[in-house]
Image (spheres, rainbow, N blue to C red):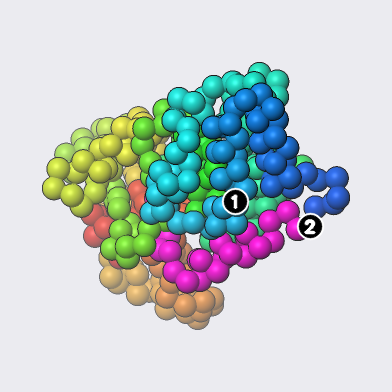
Amino acid sequence: MRKILITDEIRRLAKEYADNLFTKRNSQFIMPEDGLRIFANELRLHGKDNYATYVDAIIDHYYEILIIEPNRFDYYKNVYFNTLRDEDLLQHVNGCPGNKKFYEVIVDKMRYDAVQKKEIRPYIKKLGIKTCVYCNASYAIATDDNKATYQVDHCFPKSKYPFLCTSFFNLQPSCMHCNQIKSKKDDYIYSMYTDVPTELTPFYFSIDSRSIIKYMLTHNSDYLRFKLKSNDDENEIAIRHSDFFHLDSLYTQFTDAAEELIWKGKIFNAAYRNQLMNMYNKKIAFGMDDFKRFYLGFYPDSKDINKRPLTLLMQGIAKEMGLK
Ligand SMILES: [Zn+2]
């Protein structure tokens, strides 16, 4: 849920991804441009020239497409990929192998499967993201061939933007829960990238103070209630995000984590903190950031939200409980 600022360093990473894409594959591996060329010919043979032109546009702009930034996605769609409408992409036309729809064949030919299994992994690792960028409630980590890997989602859906299916800035780590929701509905876009520094943390969590009172009276954490919030007047950005990914119901399952922070908020004080800090500095001395993490039990800095599930929730509640 913490966004990544598109800096020159991130652009360099995208370029490194594009430059190295499939370079370590053996000669049996069909490169995207070759597969696409064969597909375009097949479509022409069947008189599907407008479809073939769409494929040609991918071949012509292949490298740029790999590194274009989200604010240019629609521009590319409107300028270079306007020979087909959204509904045309969903058709099975003569020239498409098997029963596949046109956009599915594009995704195959662009070798998205190979990108997701291997090519994008090291870059997500370099970005330091381990959690789902949509919910921050789960890790976006799975295993493949007994190796830890990431579950990846297309920010702009491949059914409408198949040419972006292997683009660096269109691939983001996602958990199973959010991935499933996105596969059923594609009318909401949340990019983990931004070029606006003030938009890095669009959301925060707030706890309902009345629910804390109810919890203290009952010792039942099910009464704890928190809401995703955003900084716009009507909270519309957060409501839309939360509704789309069902975060209200999802987060009812994490009240025990909030409970621990309520205890800490009531008991931890400056004297206890100082005493612990002295002991920490004598025995460990890894610096203030690590001390804060040790003391609070979660990553306290907003730049680390994507490192561990529920960090956004913990940060929001700790702030409201006066924990520092
Ligand atoms: Zn998720």
The residue where tag 1 is placed is 60
Mark 2 lies on a secondary structure that is: loop
Dot 1 surroundings within 10 Å: few (below 14), some, or many (20 or more)?
few
Which of labels 2 and 1 is toward the front?
1
Residue 191 in view here: no
Q: Is residue 247 magenta?
A: no
Furthest toward the right, the residue is 27
Amino acid type indicated by mark 2: Lys
Front residue of this view, candidates 313 and 255? 313
Which stretch appears magenta? 1-23
Quarter of the rendering containing residue 104: top right
Residue at 65% in and 42% down = 110
Q: Which mark is residue 163?
A: none
Whether residue 159 sits left or right of residue 119 in the image: it is left
In terms of sequence position, does the residue under pointer 2 or pointer 1 come before the other? 2
Amino acid type indicated by mark 1: Asp
The residue where tag 2 is placed is 24
